[in-house]
Image (cartoon, rainbow, N blue to C red):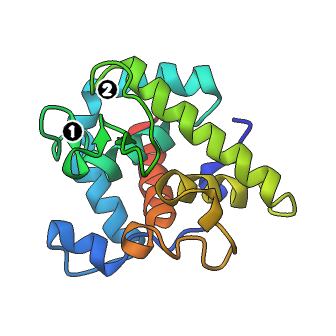
Amino acid sequence: MGYGNIMRVETSGASEQTSQQDRLNYSGVKASHRMAEIDADRMEKYRSNINRVGGKYGIDPAIIAAIISRESRAGNQLNNGWGDGGNAWGLMQVDVNPQGGGHTKRGAWDSEEHLCQGTEILVDFIKQVTKKLPSWTKEQQLKGGIAAYNMGVGNVRTVANVDVGSTGGDYSNDVVARAQWYKTNKGY
């Protein structure tokens, strides 16, 4: 994959705040792995679409699965496809709020078309981070793009604190750890 190797991305995993969503009494990579595992059975019904979309856009399918796990718990946290108080759509929670991402929803909440839209947004963020921070390694740029998916490129500033300002203060670290779990344990 042209955007860096997810298995080489450094990660501290989920924050305590994020791990509390599942009432885990621990945080870090172990918590991210556990949350990915909890979502794994639900994720299976999207596997073929995830793999097709990953191939189409040159993004490791494990990253798409991890974003789906983090954003919607593989659809489990959605109400008729909506989340975030009606501000986000679908498995990948595309921001439709005019004061936020301002995207127009595409496709059914669990469709390949929706996954294409979310992945296009992710790829665009990775490219923006790459342009903004050309001295970063590919893996750092990938992680920065994942963070930007949650909080915008303007907030991606330093390698050491890439998640400052992200939901839970751990967005990219959690997504990376989940992606590593999906790649290692589920073959995405």
**Which numbered disc covers residue 115?**
none
Q: Label 2's element?
A: helix
The location of residue 151, given as percent across then percent down, is 50, 60
The location of residue 105, given as percent across then percent down, is 36, 27
Residue type highlighted by circle 1: Trp
Instruction: Give the residue furthest to the front.
Output: 98
Q: Earlier in the sequence, mark 1 or mark 2?
A: 2
Q: Nearer the viewer, residue 165 or 52?
A: 165
**Which numbered disc covers residue 46?**
2
Q: Residue at x 68, y 71 (%)?
A: 157
Could you tell me if the residues under marks 1 and 2 are in contact, i.e. CB atoms within 8 Å? no
**Which numbered disc covers residue 82?**
1
**Cα separation between marks 1 and 2:** 17 Å
The location of residue 99, given as percent across then percent down, is 42, 51
82 left or right, relative to 159: left
Q: Nearer the viewer, residue 158 or 30?
A: 158
Q: Residue at x 48, y 28 (%)?
A: 117
